[in-house]
Each structure stands twice: as structure tokens, then as C-alpha cells.
Amino acid sequence: MILSMKPPYDITPKILKLISAISEKIGEVNANYLSKQSPQLRKQNRIKTIQSSLQIEGNTLTEDQITALLENKRIIGPKKDVLEVLNAIKVYDNLKKYKLHSEKDFLKAHASLMKGLINNAGKYRNQSVGIVKGNNIEHVAPPFQQVPYLMKNLFEYLKDEQELTLIKSCVFHYEMEFIHPFLDGNGRMGRLWQTVILLNEYQIFEFLPFESLISASQEEYYQSLSLSDKLGKSTPFIEYMLGVIEKSLSQLLNYNNRILKDNDRLEYFLSQGYKEFSRREYMNVFKDIASATASRDLKKGIELNLFKSSGQLNKTKYIVK
């Protein structure tokens, strides 16, 4: 019988403020239907996620090269880097199939992510490891004999329904990095599983590329891990990660409508199952666009033979074909 122990951390004013800001922004995202972006935008964000997460680990492939691989095209690049991306594409395609508190799914994801890259992919390490930065030993991971117990305890913690999902995702990410359960692939698994945990409650995290902000602030990422190690609690890392999530949501809200093209809006709107609708109903879905933009969208939809119009001026109805 394993007694589950809650990993140590403090709730600071900064953490409370960030959780409040994130919750508010998630509400705004849902109100603007941004959690159900167009297929094209979802694809772009998935590419950013994969490229950023692997770039942190030294992968050299660009977003264009990853796009080509996603479209089953051949590219020229280091064999290891190409394999890392192909593995990541497969894993992120199955993101919704992983159960957040299933250790079996966690190991399965690692096996897919590291297939052909290391021996014993999908299995916990059987030797002691340390992380060296320059000439210094940055972190000595717990003895390998303790790994199965520590990971089991961590997955028991994920079942605690009293814990906020946002906090839980950060704590798991840090604790997993501390335990360092695998010989390789720990960083990408920490980021992947944080996404799996968040996705369980918030749909937007399936395609929100917060890894790109981690990639852009790698020094701060590693500093927060190191500071948490020294304090013996994950508080600094929770503050850092919540800050990253808050910034990524802000970017989505600030830039999404600039990125969204008329084709994207029409494609998303029609995916909602409307048979007949008015311009007002169209604008209720895309709250931040101007009425002139809505009129241009609807005119283009008619030109593309997506629907036809009936009536005049504010009495106009659009009938989907």
C-alpha cells in the first residue's frame, strides 16, 4: 500500500493573482469561441508547440520543416531531429487519448516520444543520474530504486480533486523533472504531461503553444527549477509556469483576430451546424470584428457558394447549402 504525500509548495500572492488572471482570460477565450480555432490555426499552433518543445532539447528543425513533415513531405535534416519530430507529431495527435492520472499512459507516451532515440523507451531508468551544467553538478536525481515509488506517489497526487488543475499541472511538471524518471526525454515529457493535465479541464490547452514562451525564456525556466530544488518546494516553478500560461493566453486574445482570416471565420462558423442565420448571429460568434468585416465575410461566403442570401438589409437571411 502506497501512502500518497502531497508535494510541498506555498500559495503566494503572486500565484493567487496569476490564477485569477488566467481564469479571467480562459473565460474570455471561451466567450469568444477562441478555444475552437479554425483547423488551419490549430495546425499552426500544434507546429509551434512541437518546434518549441524540441528546440529546448536542442532540435534544429524549423517550423517550415516541421510543417513539411506534418504533410508527409521529405526534408533534409539531421536524422535524429527528424525522428524526434515524427515521434512528437504522433504523440500530440493522440493527446486527448491519454488519461492524466494513468501511469500506464504516461509510459506509453514516453515510449512513442522516444522510439528509436534511446534504449528502453517507455521504461523508468535503472541507473543513477545527475544534471551537469558546465563544470557544476546542477541536480542529483533520486536513486533509481526510488523512481517507481516516487512516480506512483505523484500520480496518486493527480487524483486529488481538491487541488486546482492549474496548480496541479505545474507541481507535476516540477516534481517529474526533479525525479528525472527517464534516462532521456524528461523535459519534453514534463511539458507534454502538463498539457495533458490542463486539457482535462480546459479545451484551449490542446492547441495553446505555451512551450514557445518557455523556449523564449529558457534561462528563467531552468532558474525556476533550480531555485525550487534549493528551497525544497515547487513554489518558484509554479510562479514561473503560471506566468507563462497567462502570457500565452494574453497573446491568443491579443493576436487571434489579426491572424484569423475570412476563410478561417467562415470555416469555423459553418462547423457550428447553422442551417440558416443572420449577420447579427455571425457577429455574435466573432464579437471583435467590425460590421463591415462581417459583411465582407458573408459576401465572400456567397461567392464561394457556401450559402445563399434571402431578403434585404437587416432582414437578410443566409441559407447554408
Image (cartoon, rainbow, N blue to C red):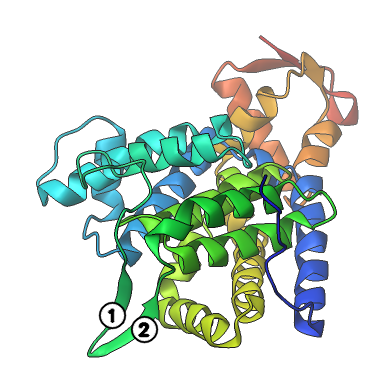
Number of callouts: 2
What numbered label is drawn on residue 12? Answer: none
Where residue 268 appears, as percent x and y from the top left, is: 64, 31
Q: Residue at x 22, y 47 (%)?
A: 118
The outermost residue toward the bottom is 135
Tag 2: amino acid: Glu
Rendering coords of residue 175 (x, y %) = 56, 65
Element at label 1: strand
Instruction: Identify which residue, 59 or 141, lies in the foreground.
Output: 141
Compared with residue 207, is residue 273 higher up or lower down, i.e. above or below? above
Q: CA distance from mark 1 to mark 2?
A: 5 Å
The numbered mark, 1 or 2, whose residue comes first in the sequence reads 1
Q: Is residue 9 above or below residue 159?
A: below
Name the amino acid, label 1. Val
Label ID, residue 132: 1
Location of mark 2 (residue) = 138
- Label 2 element class: strand
